Amino acid sequence: MSAIVYEPVIGLEVHAQLKTESKMFCNCGTKFGEPPNTQVCPVCLGLPGSLPVPNQLAFELALKTALALHCELAGFTKFDRKNYYYPDLPKNYQISQYDLPFSKQGHLDITVDGVSKRIGITRVHLEEDAGKLVHFEGSSGVDLNRAGTPLMEIVSEPDLRSAAEARAYMEALAHILEFIGVCDCNMQEGSLRCDANVSIRPAGQKTLNTRREIKNMNSFRFVEQAIVAEIAAQQAIYAAGGAVQQETRLFNGETGEIRTMRTKEEAQDYRYFPEPDLPPITITAETLARIQAQLEELPAARRQRYSEQYKLSAYDAQVLTDDKAMGDFFEAVIKQGVSPKAAANWIASDLQGILKERNLRIDTCGLTPAAVVELIELVEKKKQLNRNAAKELVFPKMLETKKSALEIAKAENLLIVADAGATEQVVDTVLAKFPKLVADYVAGKDAVINAIFGKCMAEFKGKGDPAVIRPLLEKKLKGLREQK
Ligand SMILES: [Zn+2]
């Protein structure tokens, strides 16, 4: 009997903390890492008589996300209470959205092993986060700083068919959320978390088998590992003739194990009902138009435009659109007259490399596009600075001192000796200094020219232009060989 081939069916529910200064329904701050219970007030502590007021910015950031994910927006939406008891939930209910979320039916494109696939988004809705339990030896504490933090829940259709696709989806989603500035996606701080619904079925079967849910994964790697482990666990159950029971499970990133958290019998009935303290919201055409206008060109569209409009290589277009700030900087540089190809070469490879080395970001490193334009022009247009010297010496100094490229090149005595006579003099000096190398070349050892060229560049102390020196040196050496 041949083994049954199973097809995994996976849907993800991603929780993303919105990038706002204050909480969803009160004015408390949302800064991570503050001393416990210092960002709380009667509203987020759930004290009797306190009333929630929705955070306008949180609502707009959520709308922006829904637009970026190509969702249909509802004209009318409301908040609901999701009732349950847990020590980190002081009100005994969470304000969420149930039957009338503000958006539905979007999609997100992912690429795995070069193959693109469209993943459906069921809905994006708004809710508030709970607090956090902290466990000590022999006791536990509750920190309510996070209670009431604005949270988006982004639910995918069960369109994912492997752990790798699930990871790619999560990464693509994080990329967009960060790109449009709605979430910092700091997974270590819990800004982005994911639950996965996983079932498997014999390949070709149309109906779905029972699924199990894995809760609260906070890294891309964990999402992938947990799903791989869950698929294997379900295969083992079916192989042994068993049936998968609906349950909620927890993945332990350190041990790689998944364990049962609760089974179907313990499933909660949340008794959803409309939140009586918050009026329903009508999303007007004006609001929509305003949010639409704020929505950035998305990475995929930008990438395509860069290859078509600027004729950039796939690699350059990718690097320049991965990070929004990088692309914005690139466009500012070409606006000032640098050719797209030259700007891409400098920004996507040279500058990016140095910034990475120093753990800096283009938008916060203190360099303006104009300063980089000056550097590029000194090399490409004015030919006053050698590319290597610009990259190795001038650019790092620009980062450190914030002085202009020209100032640094002058102070460091790096400006190229443009005078042909002066160049020739230096080459002659080198030839006189290293008679043995010259004799070797004349005797037929062609490769020695590289060593002599190196000596010339050293003699120029970074100010030499290889494009001038190399041909001159070749001409002189060939002349010497012919004279022999
Ligand atoms: Zn509060």
Image (cartoon, grey):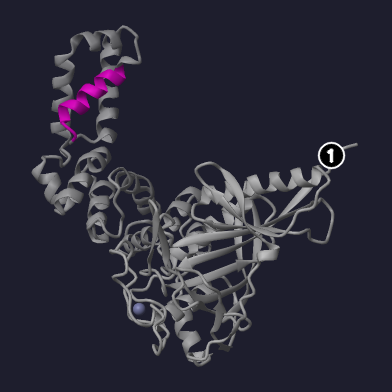
Residue at mark 1: 3
Tell me if residue 109 comes above or below residue 123 in the rendering. Answer: above
Residue 162 shows in this picture: yes
Q: Is residue 1 left or right of residue 397?
A: right
Q: Toward which corner of the image does residue 109 lie, by quadrant?
A: bottom right
Q: Residue at x 44, y 64 (%)?
A: 179
Q: Is residue 468 left or right of residue 136?
A: left
Give x and y (percent) for residue 223.
Answer: 56, 51
Q: Residue furthest right?
A: 1
- In which quadrant is the N terminus drawn? top right
Main SS of residues in magenta: helix
| Above or below, comparing residue 437 to residue 339 in the picture | above
Q: Nearer the viewer, residue 473 or 195?
A: 195
Can residue 299 be seen here? The reply is: no
Q: Give left or right: position of 6 versus 317.
A: right
In the image, which residues are magenta? 449-462
Disc 1 packing (10 Å; few <14; some 14–19; many ≥20): few
Observer-nearest of 259 and 376: 259
Q: Secondary structure at mark 1?
A: loop
Q: Residue 449: where, in percent of width, then height?
A: 30, 18
Residue 395 position, x and y percent, is 22, 46
Across and down, in percent, residue 79 comes to: 53, 84
Q: Is residue 467 magenta?
A: no
Q: Residue at x 48, y 76 (%)?
A: 62
Which of the two residues, 370 or 10, is positioned nearer the viewer here?
Answer: 10
Instruction: Give me the residue at 60% from left, 48% from top.
Output: 258
Amino acid carrying label 1: it is Ala
Ligand 1: give its quadrant.
bottom left
Quarter location, residue 189: bottom left
Q: Quadrant of residue 197?
A: bottom right
Quarter of the image where the C terminus is located: top left
